[in-house]
Each structure stands twice: as structure tokens, then as C-alpha cells.
Image (spheres, grey):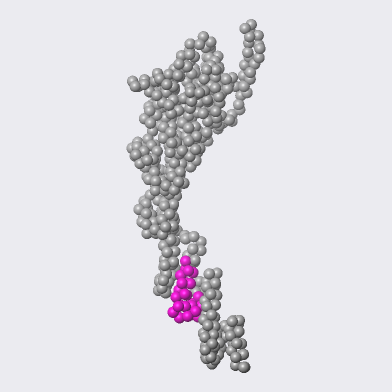
């Protein structure tokens, strides 16, 4: 595997500048990216152009003060020196095919030191010789073009390399291998007398899916790899500007070249915008996420994911407010953002707040009239979207039991129990109502027992007898009342 990584998840102009001013990543592309795209449309890019663009994509761009193509300082000067050294070599063949092979050998001998899977930048090659398939392919393309060869890129699902055109033949160059020119051919080594002393063979790879890419598209893989590396470390904010630059760099493409392994740059940019926004939501910065959506969607509208993104952020904001019992503020916040939500999402969030309002309403019942009023509201409520299963029934049961408790306080537990029996007949059996009814019955029995005990303890036997007789008519099988009656009978027999 080469180590070519496609960034994947899963949010210019003035909007990008406003984003940066607000503390968000700047998604306004570097103007140079559009300039490079215009250069490609205008004709063949020179090796100096390719070197400059590659350094820019690597994050080490340099320009001369006079606006020249390649600065004569730093990495630009290093590349110029390498090119001059290549051209000055007496061993550089005249034959185009041999020249292409020589350049690969020269590059490995002179610059490439160690393969590092994710080292995609050209400036790092120049600094310490670390490379991967992308960075080595880009370097080879620059050197090949400087030597008069036609070179472009090729992509597979997990690899990148170069093709060189020699006449009508297109020759693959596996740039990570010093013997990777035209894989599948045998290399012979000769001594000073022309005798074969050995050979090397690099097998050709059988790529089922290979995709030809332009010179700028090959260079853009530097940006793609840098984006993937940043996102693998959760540095989503730094990935956004690189995606904007890549989209601008490839803005001159004549057709959509999106494949499973070479994403359309505009789509890729949108993915980075959403990934950064999602990172804000995961960090609990939901208000920032909504502000980010306002800025980014203003520049890149039309993607349905913005609605889902806003819904997720708004849901989190409302849940936080509701958990802190700031229900009125939650409803005001929802209505202020109504225009940015699609109707179904608004309805779902409206019902979320309604649920909290009904819960607050029932929890705050303090009188019989309030219980009756709450019950009427619950029975007649028309939520914009369905309440959670069983939620309406739970709220109604709570209000009914509250009403039963207030009835008990005013008219006794018997009246409360009769009320709950009627409720079960009206609404059907419910475990909470059944349990409430048992409690009310138990309290009624306790009420009768306590009245009997008080009369009995004060010697008022006839009144006690009347109470226990009436109690047993009401609860003929109750053990406590039967025991009370036996206690009374034993007292009479003494």
C-alpha cells in the first residue's frame, strides 16, 4: 500500500473572510489557487510552475518579490539546483525512454531516502528525503517535465504513480521503487566489457481500477493527504482551508472526475465543512455550530445535509435548555430559528418542547381545579409530531391520580377510589391506575380501622359496632376489618 488517504467523514469570498473574523476556519480559497487553475487552462504547465504549485500545496509556497515563477531561495532554489544537476549530468540519455528511467534512478540516488506512508509533501522530501507514492510521483513529474518528457498521474484506490508518454507508448513509473520504470520489464546490469552481471525485476501491478489524472490533479493529492492526516487527528478546522484551496485549484476541470477514490473537490469541500461543524456539535458548541451553518451555507447552499445539521444543533440547544427548566426560553429559541429548519424538523422540536411543557404542567398541579384543567389540556392536545409512545397516557394518568388525591382530601378515600374506578372504566386498565386504586382502597380501609379503633379505645362500643359493620359491608373480605370485628366480639363476651 502506498498510503494514499482519502479524507472522509462526516460542513469563498466574503463569507470565508467573515468566518475567519468570527473565529471559524477561513474557507475563502487562496487567490493563487485560481491563478494556477487559469495557468493550466491556458496551456502546458512548465516544470517551474509545477514546482511552485507543489510547494504551495505542501504548505511551503514561495514567490519572488517581482512575481517570478519560482523563488531563488529556500525550497524553490533546492528544486532549481536539482534540475540543473540533472541536466548537467553527462549520463543523462538522449533517448526519451532511457531518459525517463534515468530520472527515476537519479531521483532515488539524489533525494529519496526513506519511505513514510503518510509523507505526502514535496518540501519534506527536499528537507530529509522522506517520501510516499504521492510526493515521489509529484517530484518525478517535475523532473521529467524539466527534461522534456510528457508526464501525468494515475490513481488507484490506494496508490498513485506516474505515466510517461514516449511516442505512442504510455509507460508506468512506480516512483517509490528505484527500479519501478515500466514495471514488468527485466533490468540487466553489465560490466565494463558489456557482460551481463545480474538483473532486477519489478513485477507489474494488475490494477483493476486505474484512473488517469492531470498534473494539477496529481498535485492536488498532496492537499487530499494533508486533509486526511489533519482529520485523523481531529484538527478539522485546519482541514477546511486546504479543502477550499483544492477546490479552487481544480476549478478549471472540464468534466466531473468524481470516482470512489478521487472525490469531486466541491463535494470534498462540503464534507470538510460538515466535518468541522460536526466537531463543534460533539464539543457541545451548538450555538457556534448554528453560526457556522449560517456562514458556510450562505456560500455553499443547496445541500440537504445543512437541514439535518441545523436540526442536530438545535435539538442539542433545546435539550440543554429543557434540562435546566428554561422551557420558555427554549420555545422562543425554536421560533427564532423556525425559518432555518424544515417543517418536519420544526414539528419534532416543537413537540419536544410541548412534552416538557406538559410535564411541567402536571408536575405543578396543586389543586383539584388545576388537575381538571391539566387533564382537559392533555386530552385535547394536538402535537405537531407524535409524542413518544405512551407519553400522553402517562401524563393523563399522573393528572388523574392527582385529581383522586385532591378528591380524597375533600371527600375521603372512598370517593377517590370510586373516581379511579370510573377512570379505569373510561380509559381502560393501566398499571399505574390499578396501583393507585389499590392505594386508595388501602387508605380507605386504614381510615375505617382508625375510626373503629378510636371509638373502641374510648369505650364507645355501639358506635364502634356500627362502624365495623358498615366497613365489612364495604370490604367483606378484608383481614384487618375482620380482626377488628372479632376484637369487638371478644370484648362483648367478657
Q: Quadrant of residue 481?
A: bottom right
- Region in magenta: 395-421
> In the rendering, at what x and y percent does residue 66 appear?
33, 20
Q: Quadrant of residue 46?
A: top left
The residue lying toward the viewer, choosing from 96 and 13, is 13
The residue lying toward the viewer, choosing from 357 and 268, is 357
Question: Residue at image x 65%, y 9%?
Answer: 195
> Left of 113 or right of it: where is 350?
left
> In the rendering, at what x and y percent does residue 131 appear?
52, 25
Residue 348 visible somewhere in the drawing: yes
Q: Is residue 330 above or below residue 29?
A: below
> Left of 305 or right of it: where is 16?
left
Q: Is residue 369 above or below residue 273?
A: below
Residue 166 visible somewhere in the drawing: no
Quadrant in the picture for the N terminus: top right
> In the rendering, at what x and y percent does residue 458 appear?
52, 89
Q: Is residue 410 magenta?
A: yes
> In the rendering, at what x and y percent does residue 398 appear?
48, 69
**Which residue of the protein is positioned furthest toward the top in this rendering?**
193
The residue lying toward the viewer, choosing from 475 and 450, is 450
Q: Is residue 204 magenta?
A: no
Question: Residue at image x 53%, y 30%?
Answer: 118
Question: Residue at image x 37%, y 35%?
Answer: 28
Q: Main secondary structure of the magenta part?
A: helix
> Left of 288 or right of it: where is 116?
right
Question: Residue at image x 63%, y 14%?
Answer: 188
Quadrant in the picture for the C terminus: bottom right
Amino acid at each position: 500500500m502506498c498510503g494514499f488517504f482519502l479524507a472522509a467523514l462526516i460542513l469563498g469570498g466574503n463569507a470565508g473572510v467573515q468566518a475567519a473574523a468570527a473565529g471559524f476556519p477561513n474557507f475563502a480559497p487562496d487567490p493563487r489557487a485560481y491563478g494556477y487553475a487559469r495557468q493550466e487552462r491556458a496551456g502546458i504547465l512548465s516544470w517551474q510552475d509545477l514546482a511552485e504549485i507543489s510547494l504551495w500545496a505542501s504548505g511551503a509556497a514561495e514567490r519572488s518579490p517581482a512575481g517570478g515563477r519560482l523563488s531563488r531561495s529556500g525550497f524553490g532554489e533546492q528544486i532549481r539546483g536539482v534540475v540543473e544537476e540533472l541536466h548537467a549530468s553527462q549520463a543523462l540519455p538522449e533517448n526519451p525512454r532511457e531518459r525517463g528511467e534515468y530520472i527515476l534512478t537519479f531521483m532515488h540516488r539524489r533525494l529519496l531516502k526513506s519511505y513514510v506512508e503518510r509523507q505526502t509533501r514535496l518540501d519534506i522530501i527536499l528537507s530529509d528525503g522522506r517520501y510516499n507514492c504521492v510526493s515521489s510521483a509529484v517530484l518525478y513529474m517535475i523532473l521529467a517535465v524539466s527534461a522534456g518528457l510528457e508526464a501525468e498521474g494515475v490513481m488507484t484506490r490506494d496508490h498513485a504513480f506516474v505515466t510517461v508518454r514516449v511516442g505512442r507508448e504510455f509507460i508506468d513509473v512506480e516512483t517509490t521503487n528505484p527500479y519501478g520504470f515500466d514495471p514488468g520489464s527485466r533490468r540487466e546490469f553489465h560490466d565494463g566489457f558489456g557482460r551481463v552481471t545480474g538483473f532486477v525485476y519489478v513485477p507489474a501491478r494488475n490494477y483493476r481500477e486505474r484512473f488517469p489524472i492531470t498534473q494539477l490533479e496529481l498535485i492536488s493529492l498532496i492537499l487530499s493527504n494533508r486533509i486526511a492526516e489533519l482529520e485523523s487527528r481531529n484538527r478539522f478546522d485546519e482541514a477546511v482551508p486546504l479543502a477550499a484551496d483544492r477546490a479552487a485549484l481544480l476549478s478549471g476541470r472540464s468534466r466531473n472526475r468524481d470516482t470512489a477514490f478521487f472525490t469531486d473537490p466541491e463535494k470534498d469541500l462540503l464534507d470538510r465543512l460538515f466535518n468541522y461543524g460536526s466537531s463543534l456539535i460533539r464539543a457541545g458548541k451548538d450555538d457556534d455550530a448554528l453560526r457556522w451553518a449560517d456562514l458556510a451555507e450562505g456560500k455553499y447552499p443547496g445541500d440537504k445535509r445543512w437541514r439535518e445539521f441545523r436540526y442536530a444543533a438545535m435539538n442539542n440547544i433545546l435539550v440543554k435548555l429543557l434540562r435546566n427548566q428554561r422551557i420558555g426560553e427554549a420555545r422562543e429559541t425554536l421560533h427564532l430559528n423556525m425559518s432555518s429548519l424544515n417543517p418536519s424538523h420544526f414539528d419534532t422540536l416543537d413537540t419536544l418542547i410541548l412534552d416538557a411543557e406538559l410535564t411541567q404542567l402536571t408536575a405543578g398541579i396543586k389543586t383539584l381545579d388545576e388537575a381538571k384543567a391539566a387533564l382537559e389540556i392533555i386530552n385535547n392536545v394536538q402535537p405537531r409530531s407524535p409524542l413518544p409512545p405512551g407519553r400522553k397516557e402517562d401524563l393523563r394518568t399522573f393528572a388523574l391520580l392527582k385529581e383522586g388525591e385532591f378528591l380524597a382530601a375533600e371527600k375521603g378515600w372512598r370517593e377517590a377510589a370510586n373516581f379511579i374506578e370510573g377512570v379505569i372504566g373510561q380509559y381502560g386498565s393501566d398499571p399505574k391506575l390499578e396501583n393507585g386504586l389499590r392505594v386508595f382502597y388501602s387508605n380507605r380501609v386504614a381510615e375505617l380501622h382508625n375510626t373503629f379503633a378510636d371509638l373502641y379505645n374510648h369505650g364507645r362500643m355501639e358506635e364502634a359496632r356500627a362502624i365495623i359493620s358498615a366497613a365489612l359491608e364495604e370490604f367483606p373480605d378484608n383481614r384487618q376489618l375482620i380482626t377488628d370485628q372479632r376484637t369487638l366480639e371478644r370484648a362483648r363476651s367478657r
